[in-house]
Amino acid sequence: MLQRFPETVKWHNDRTQRFRSLAKALLLQTLGMTLATMVAVIFWRQVAGFTKTPFGLIFSLMVSMIFASKIIPGLFDLWRMLLWTGRAIFRPRGTQHLQIAAASLVTFCWISLIVLTALRFAEPVMGFFERLGISVSV
């Protein structure tokens, strides 16, 4: 199931077209996840003092479950895109276990980079959007 080609990406028999399609989908998925993580960072920084009550803890748990139900499928898509990008760039050599381990390691580093970027640049990016007139209210 995890090794099937990503559903949001069109399959091409040509390796170059397949790589371009995967790179485009990977870029769009990364941008979407980065913006979603920035919104989540802003949201959790605003309600940090609110979570000291039992109601606040239950509320934050429910919101976390909703975020997780939306983010986890995106993480699996990201993993699939990185796996198939690796297969498009490099000719399949070795075992599939090695490819899966490499894709998992690259995905972990990719997600860590997304989270670090979101933590570092959440306020400046959201401030820039507000100056443009785009309001992201949380």
Image: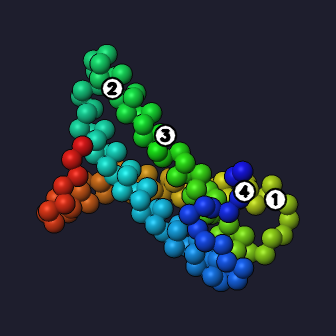
Q: At 42% across and 37% down in the image, what residue appears?
A: 66
Upstream in sequence: badge 3 or badge 4? 4
Q: How far apart are marks 3 and 1 (CA)?
A: 28 Å
Single out the mark in the foreground, 4 or 1: 4
Looking at the image, which is closer to me, 42 or 109? Answer: 42
Tag 3: residue type?
Ser
Residue carrying label 2: 59
Alpha carbon distance from label 4 to label 1: 10 Å
SS for tag 1? helix
In the drawing, does residue 134 fall left or right of residue 4?
left
Say whether disc 2 or disc 4 marks the residue closer to the N-terminus. Answer: 4
Label pair 4/1, CB-CB below 8 angstroms: yes
Residue assigned mark 4:
3
Amino acid type assigned to the residue bearing label 1 in the image: Gln
The kind of secondary structure element at disc 4 is: loop
Residue 18 x %, y %: 64, 77
x, y percent for residue 77: 58, 56
Camera-nearest residue between 114 and 62: 62
Q: Which residue lies furthest to the top in this view?
A: 54
Asked whether disc 3 touches disc 4, contact meaning CB atoms under 8 Å apart, the reply is: no
Cα separation, mark 1 vs mark 2, equals: 42 Å
Q: Report crowding for label 2: few under 14, some 14 to 19, many 20 or more residues within 10 A (C-alpha).
A: some
Q: In this view, does 133 lie above or below 138?
A: below
The first of marks 1 and 2 along the sequence is 2
